[in-house]
Amino acid sequence: MVRFFLRRSCVFLLTLFVASLAIFAMVEIIPGDPARTMLGLNASDEAVAALRTELNLNQSGVRRYLAWIGGICQGDFGLSYTYRTPAITLIAERLAITLPLALYALILTIGIALPLGAFAGTREGTAADRLITLASQFGIALPNFWFAVMLILIFALNLGWLPAGGFDGWEAGIAQGLAHLTLPAIALALPQASILLRVMRGALIETARQDYIRTARAKGLSRDQALWRHGFANALIPVLTILGMQLSFLIAGAIIIENVFRLPGLGRLIVQAINQRDLILTEAIILLMVALVISVSFLTDLLYGAIDPRLRRQRP
């Protein structure tokens, strides 16, 4: 298990390094003047020259990358040009909304998909299975931004059960904060839950056809008992693959949903940073989101190894 962990850690660090190079290249080295982009086309040459000096744009790309990545390793993501505030401070404030929203949506996704997928997978071909499959197809086809608008119209404006948008801050209480995040979380969760449900159903059906399940049934276990005792862990491997990807999708999808519900999270911050040509803040947010996605993939790999011992014994 230690060697497995070390191999995955090396892949994680290498991927993060390559991602940082790609982000830096796209934002700072590609043709164009970042200082001119930040200040706009009508800015004076003196102002552009001053900003270039402040951002060390007169140095070589290699020196700027090393200075940037060295600052990040020390927790310094740079100073936002628009807000004149450390980028990490702005990001931390917005992550206090985006991460709870993504985790809330992930909990809803798991709570909907796994029980229904397991129920449908153990009752293949029944009316209940066909109904759940049909509902999941409908959920996959729903655009989450349109679904978000429908949730606002029904549950916020017509019924008045939940807030239509905005966020009063966690200082107003956890219950109040969760109330503001419920509709956005549902809008994020339903399409992902529909996908995960179908994966869970298909994995259980495939597992039920394996020889070791037939052997367990020949020894006197029922189909459901054989699946839960011997097949459920194997069926979870493709589910974990999709689940790891879905957390990344939920974080990225929050960019759209936060703007629909007017949530002051990371999604709105990156839209504002791009509109205001704040390349320093944009660079920091993109790197953080990429790091979150890579970290989720890394943790998913570790879960694979915990569930399936065969993966730990594989040679590099």
Image (tube, grey):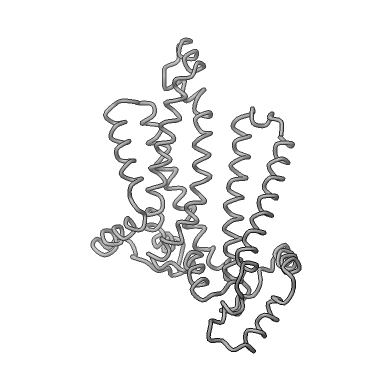
In the displayed structure, does residue 133 sit left or right of residue 66?
Answer: left
In the displayed structure, does residue 92 sit left or right of residue 139?
Answer: right
In the displayed structure, does residue 27 sit left or right of residue 4?
Answer: left
Q: Quadrant of the C terminus?
A: top right
Residue depicted at 43% across the width and 66% down the height: 263
Position of residue 75 measured from the top left corner of the image (x, y, whole percent): 69, 65
Residue depicted at 48% across the width and 51% down the height: 249
Q: Quadrant of the N terminus?
A: top right
Residue lying furthest left: 158
Position of residue 184 measured from the top left corner of the image (x, y, whole percent): 39, 58
Position of residue 289 measured from the top left corner of the image (x, y, whole percent): 57, 58
Compare residues 307 and 298 and report the one nearer the observer.
Answer: 298
Compare residues 144 and 151 and report the one nearer the observer.
Answer: 144
Compare residues 14 and 310 and report the one nearer the observer.
Answer: 14
Quadrant in which residue 312 is drawn: top right
Compare residues 178 and 126 and report the one nearer the observer.
Answer: 126
Residue depicted at 33% across the width and 50% down the height: 142
Quadrant in which residue 46 is drawn: bottom right
Look at the picture and state if 42 lies above or below 292. below
Position of residue 89 measured from the top left corner of the image (x, y, whole percent): 61, 70
